[in-house]
Each structure stands twice: as structure tokens, then as C-alpha cells.
Image: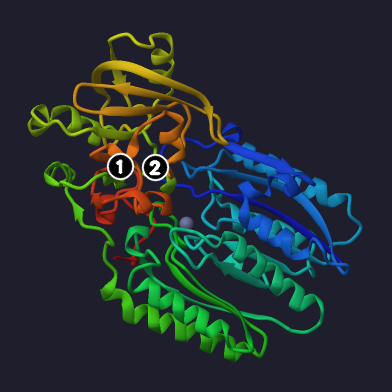
Amino acid sequence: MNIAVGGFFHESNTFNPIVTTEQDFVIFEGDAIYSQGESYLLAKGIVDYFRDSKEYRIVPLNFARAVPNGEIELDFYLRLKARFFELLAAESSIDAFVLALHGSMRVKTLGSAESDLLKSIREKYPATPIFCGLDMHATITKTMLETAQGLTGFKTAPHLDAWDTGMQAAYMADKMLRGKAELHMAAEHIPCLIAGEKAETDHSPMRELMMLTMALEAEDDLCAASIFLGFPWADAAENGVNCVVVCNSNPDKAQAYARTLADAFRASLPEFSFSAPALQPHEAILLALQDTCRPVFISDSGDNPTAGSTGDNTSMIRLLNTLPELSHSSKRILMAGIFDPQACELCKSRMGEDITLQLGGVFDRQYCKPESLGGRPLRLVEGFGPFGSDLILFSSKHFDLIITSKHIGFTGVEIFKALELDYMNLDIIVVKLGYLTEDFKAISAKHYLALSPGCSDEVLDRLHYKHQEGLLRV
Ligand SMILES: [Zn+2]
């Protein structure tokens, strides 16, 4: 039996005016999944499930993933989709699609990429089952529920189980194809939006809710139970929370399982709160200045590139540059960082010289202004990481700053190591991030969440939604 495997993975922030294009993506196709799967673990999980099987043959299609950012350029998405079907056209028959998708990828003027892709598959392959492994922050649409036979999502945030989720999507396909099961999917929608920083799975109530999904999956007739949170930084009409189950007994039972999960979720709504102290940005800095432990992390959460923000909001840089309390502090402070290709270029041509930069505020013109910062570009790393960003370490009077040439996330210590930073001896690390990654949790002595402005503002009521009437903002 032939299993078509492919996927596009992007979380698209509609408040960010950047249009995400081909150059922002890592793209590969066909057998490259066997060598590049480590960079796309959700897809690797699917492939690993089937790869040694004698009954199944994997038909690898195309794979594309990028750092969350603004919505995707329409022409580029249409090219990706065309290539997906071009690769399929060479096959005489496909027995199932098992796809690695995000669920909150949005295309300019088109809306949900996943809805569009699944609808097109259904038109061309009316009887072929479709299964998807998805991110926990997927926005589940009516079209996705009507076209797919099985959806399953991550159970951890920070996301550590992408590979396992791919395996689970593949398992559902296997179960159906071997004739062992007729599958029934049911969903219950809860009209609310929750910032990811209030829904870490190490903390209540998500920890207990995820334990409930796993307890339900231990039932003989349940293949998958997922809570999809939606993505608050997309002004999408179909946003919100969805409890989705895939069951092999009957539709009524599936609906009952979905209701059990949704009832538990609704009952937990009053418990959702930030997992770290959430403060006004200047308060977070002042508190961190008084702390004696190190390194103290402050998340510049309103401009979190891993939630699709621009990465060039200057509000925290402005504070670090102007707060009077910093002028007589000896604390070693790092700001990680800012996305500014022009500043990066200028620094590259003036390494070691004293210069003044006009930083940021190029993409995010709504929530900040460019900031003037004097200092010296100290170190340069070219082509860092899978997206090949140049990195500059820029030293100003009160703090050091990492400037990137590409829109990348600050998710681990590799970026500090590349710049030869003695990061364990820094007093304060301000990072454009929301909840801390496992890498940062391991080294952080303390963590504050600065409620800074930007395209990933944690205070959802400060954002101007136009298409989400009736959604409760938690
Ligand atoms: Zn996510």
C-alpha cells in the first residue's frame, strides 16, 4: 500500500506585516526526508513508522517549514501546492495521505493553508483517507474536520513530542488500512483564545488536561485525543479551542469522548494564568537588576518571533538604552536580540568601530519606533543555523545586543555559543520569546515575562481583532 507523506509547517501571525516567502523556508522533497528528517520531526515520525514495513511503501512528497512569521505569499504557496500534486501524479495509486502540518499556516488572501490543501486533496482523491499530525496551536477548521479521517496534535508545550505525534498519525492510518477499524472523528469547539504562555503543559491546568487526553487514549476504542488551542495572534474567523478525538467504535462514542474533554477544558478556564511572573517591561528590568542570582531571563513576549512576531520591535531596547537605573548598574546584560538586516550589513562593514545604529521599527511600525543606539560591533558569525542568518554581537554602553540578518527564533544556547558568549556569567538575558524553551529553562536562575507591546502581545485585548467576535480572551 502506498502512503503519501508530505507537509508544510508555518505558524502565521496576521498582526505581522511581513509577507513570508520562499527564501524564509527550508524546503526539500522526495528521499531527502530520510536525510533531513531531523529538521522536521513531525514528518520524520510518520516516515519512521512506515519505513521498515513490508506492507507499506512511502511516497515522499515535498516538505517546507519556516520560523513563524507573517502570512505566506500566495504565489509561493500555490507553487508548493502545485509541486505536491506534481509529485503525486507520478503514482498510479495512493492508499492514504499522512501529512505533517502545523494547522495555523495562513496564506495572503486565501486564509487557512491546511483547509485549502486538504480540500484540494479531497477533490482529486475523493476516497483516499487523510490523516494529519498537527501542532498544539493548530486552528481547526470545519473543512479540516470534514476532509480528514484523523487529526492528532502535540501534547507538550514547549513542543517535545513532534516525532511521537507523527507516529500517532501514521498509527491511525495503519489501523484503518489494515481493516482493523472504521474511524470516527468528533470535535467540540470552545470559543476562546488563550495565549500559549498560559498553557504550558508543565503547569496547571494544561498538565492535568493533557493527562486526561492520555488517560482517554488508554481506552481500547480511542486512537487519538487532542486539545488544539488555536493561535491567538491570527485574526482568523475560525480561531478558538477544539477538543478532537478519533475513535474506532461509533460516532456517538466519539462525540461523548470529545464532550468529556471539552467539559474538562471549560471547567478549567478560570485556572489559566501565566506560568512566570508577568510584569510591565520596566518593572521586569528593575526587579532583575535587584536579583542576586544569574542568569535572570526576561521574555520580551510581545515580540516573540517563534509566535510569528516581526522580531524588530525596539521597546525593550529603548528601555535598556534609557532607563536611568541602568546608568549606574554594573550588571552584565544581553539583549537577544533584534532582526535588522540593514543594521547587520552596516556592522559587517564597520567591525570594531564606534558607530551609531538606527535599529528596528522597520517591519513593526505599529507598536514601536526605530531606536538610535551607539556602540561597537564586536563579533560576527556568518550563516548561523538552518536558516543561515548572520549574527552580530553589538556592544553598547549598558548592554550587549545580538543583531540577526534573518528572522530567526532565540530558542537555545547554540546562538550564544556561536558568538562565544560566557552566558552563564551574564546577569540578565532579555530574549525575544514567550515561555522559555527547555534549553533556557535548564540555565535560567529566574524568569520574568515582560508584557511588552508587539505582534505577539500577551495582553490579547490590546490587539485589534476584526474577525473574532464572540471569542472569550483568556
Ligand atoms: Zn505550537
Secondary structure at badge 2 equals: loop
Query: Picture quarter containing residue 471?
Result: bottom left
Instruction: Tally the marks.
Output: 2
| Residue type beneath disc 1 | Gly
Tell me if label 2 and label 1 are in contact, CB under 8 Å: yes
Which residue is rendered at x = 62% and y = 87% of the image? 251
Query: Picture quarter containing residue 460?
Result: bottom left
Q: Which mark is residue 309?
A: 2
Instruction: Please state the horizontal and vertical placement of residue 295, each as a whole percent of the image.
Output: 27, 44
Instruction: Please state the horizontal and vertical placement of residue 77, each as a whole percent of the image.
Output: 63, 42
For this orientation, the residue located farthest to the right is 92
Q: Nearer the viewer, residue 307 or 126?
A: 307
Q: Is residue 243 left or right of residue 186?
A: left
| Residue type beneath disc 2 | Ser
Q: Nearer the viewer, residue 205 or 358?
A: 205
Secondary structure at badge 1 equals: loop
User: Where does the N terminus fall, quadrant-wise?
Assistant: bottom right
User: Where does the C terminus fall, quadrant-wise?
Assistant: bottom left
Which residue is rendered at x = 37% and y = 49% of the image? 440
Instruction: Classify 10 Å Cα crowding around label 1: few (below 14), some (14-19), many (20 and above).
Output: many
Tag 1 residue = 454
Query: Which color mode does the image show?
Result: rainbow
Q: Is residue 252 left or right of residue 29?
A: left
Q: Nearer the viewer, residue 102 or 299?
A: 299
Measured in 3D between alpha carbons, the distance from the residue under mark 2 to the one under mark 1, in whole angstroms, is 7 Å
